[in-house]
Amino acid sequence: MPKISFLNATGNVEKVDAKAGLTLMEVAVDNNITGIVAECGGACACATCHAYIDESWLNKLPAMDDMEDTMLDSALDRRPNSRLSCQIEINDDLDGLVVTVADNET
């Protein structure tokens, strides 16, 4: 089972087990990760699951599609490593993934 590390705004790290087949957003919600609001429930319609993927992991993720790219335009503080966690499906290759939670609650 892959382990995912979530970093929050205060620098605290929460390491959680992530079941393959779930989205990164579902893993965050299931583990009460502060800051992953997920208002739309994973429909790629709100950007409240915005996160920053550690740059060393970006090439291991599927390419961002147009819908995600457009939705990220409405996210606060979009960066080159911004992704919507609802669009990232967990698989065994993501064991050790490091994610910083964006400010999704303002």
Image (cartoon, grey):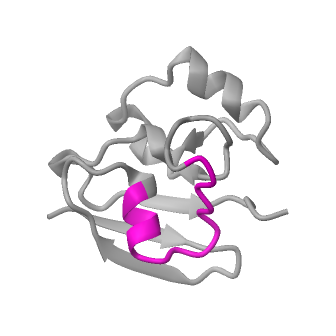
Asked whether, in this view, residue 100 is left or right of residue 94, the answer is right
Which residue is pictured at 51% across the width and 19% down the height? 65
The image quadrant where one finds the N terminus is bottom left
Query: Would you say residue 32 sits in the magenta stretch?
Result: yes
Q: Where is residue 46 drawn, in percent x and y?
A: 68, 42
Main secondary structure of the magenta stretch: loop
Pick the residue in front: 79 or 17.
Answer: 17
Pick the residue in front: 78 or 74.
Answer: 74
Which residue is pictured at 30% across the width and 62% down the height? 96
Pick the residue in front: 93 or 86.
Answer: 86
Asked whether, in this view, residue 31 is left or right of residue 38, the answer is left
Q: On the image, which quarter does residue 102 sit in?
A: bottom right
Q: Where is residue 43 drawn, in percent x and y?
A: 52, 37
95 vs 31: above or below: above
Asked whether, in this view, residue 24 is left or right of residue 55, the answer is left
**Number of numbered labels in the structure image:** 0
Q: Which residues are magenta?
A: 26-40
Asked whether, in this view, residue 72 is left or right of residue 63, the answer is right
Looking at this view, name the residue that lies furthest to the top: 66
17 vs 37: above or below: below
Q: On the image, which quarter does residue 73 sit in?
A: top right
Looking at this view, name the residue that lies furthest to the front: 40
Looking at this view, name the residue that lies furthest to the right: 106
Which residue is pictured at 69% across the width and 22% down the height? 70
Q: Where is residue 80 drawn, in percent x and y?
A: 66, 35
The image quadrant where one finds the C terminus is bottom right
Query: Would you say residue 104 sits in the magenta stretch?
Result: no
Which residue is pictured at 37% across the width and 63% down the height? 27
Q: On the image, which quarter does residue 100 sit in?
A: bottom right
